[in-house]
Amino acid sequence: MIAQLRKQLVQNGPALLRVPAKLAPFPLQKKVMLDGLAMVFKEALEDGDFEFLEDRWLKVEVRDLDLRWYISYQNEQLVVAEHVEQEDVSFSGECNDLVLIAARKEDPDTLFFQRRLRIEGDTELGLEVKNLMDSIDLDSLPAPAKFVLHQSADFIHKGMQSAAGQEEVMNAH
């Protein structure tokens, strides 16, 4: 019963979040993104590790929430824009998969080859972004952020496993 409820929440949760997420005004989305990026990439920003993104644009898209942001590094700080003329590289995926990647419950390469994570555009720039993401020390996150990330990822992972297990049983018949 609980596994079934978890499976339903994991499968339908993004659809329930789509409307409120789209209703959030861009200035609020931008503030949340910049604060979140500053927290997650604190050390990388201090070390100047974002210089490769200088005057270049990374598009991050959460497909099932119909959300997208454009991120760049200008004047030694991260910039988030609502629209740009042309992005240099694009990372896109479903909400659940992106949470699993962030919590290191799924490998981005595996999801890429399963076509669940799309990386398009400048391959070299995409690899630099991926390497920067891989370098994040999750233990350096504030305890509340780490707790929410891990709890969310565990819930999603178990819900997806439950759904996959039921699909295998159905295919066996």
Image (cartoon, grey):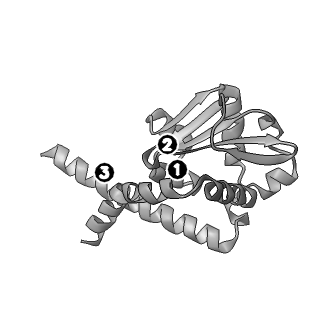
Determine whether, in the image, residue 158 is placed left or right of residue 40. Answer: left
Taking the image as drawn, is residue 59 in sight? yes
Residue type for callout 1: Leu
Packing grade of label 2 (10 A; few <14, some 14-19, many >=20) is many
Is 2 situated above or below 168? below
Of mark 1 and mark 3, the one earlier in the sequence is 1
Packing grade of label 3 (10 A; few <14, some 14-19, many >=20) is few
Residue type for callout 3: Ala
Residue 97 point in image, percent of width and height: 48, 49
Quarter-of-image position of residue 129: top right
Residues at marks 3 and 2 touching, judged by CB atoms closer than 8 Å: no
Of mark 3 and mark 2, the one earlier in the sequence is 2
Residue 113 point in image, percent of width and height: 48, 33
Residue 37 point in image, percent of width and height: 70, 55
Residue at the spot of label 1: 98
* Residue drawn at the location 43% of the way across and 47% of the way down: 64
Q: Could you tell me which secondary element the residue under label 1 belongs to?
A: helix
C-alpha span from label 1 to label 3: 18 Å
Residue at the spot of label 3: 164
C-alpha span from label 1 to label 2: 6 Å
* Residue drawn at the location 44% of the way across and 34% of the way down: 115
Residue at the spot of label 2: 93
Determine whether, in the image, residue 78 is placed left or right of residue 104. Answer: right
Q: Which image quarter is the N terminus in? A: bottom left
Quarter-of-image position of residue 172: top left
Q: Which mark is residue 12?
A: none
* Residue drawn at the location 75% of the way across and 54% of the way down: 41
Residue type for callout 2: Gly
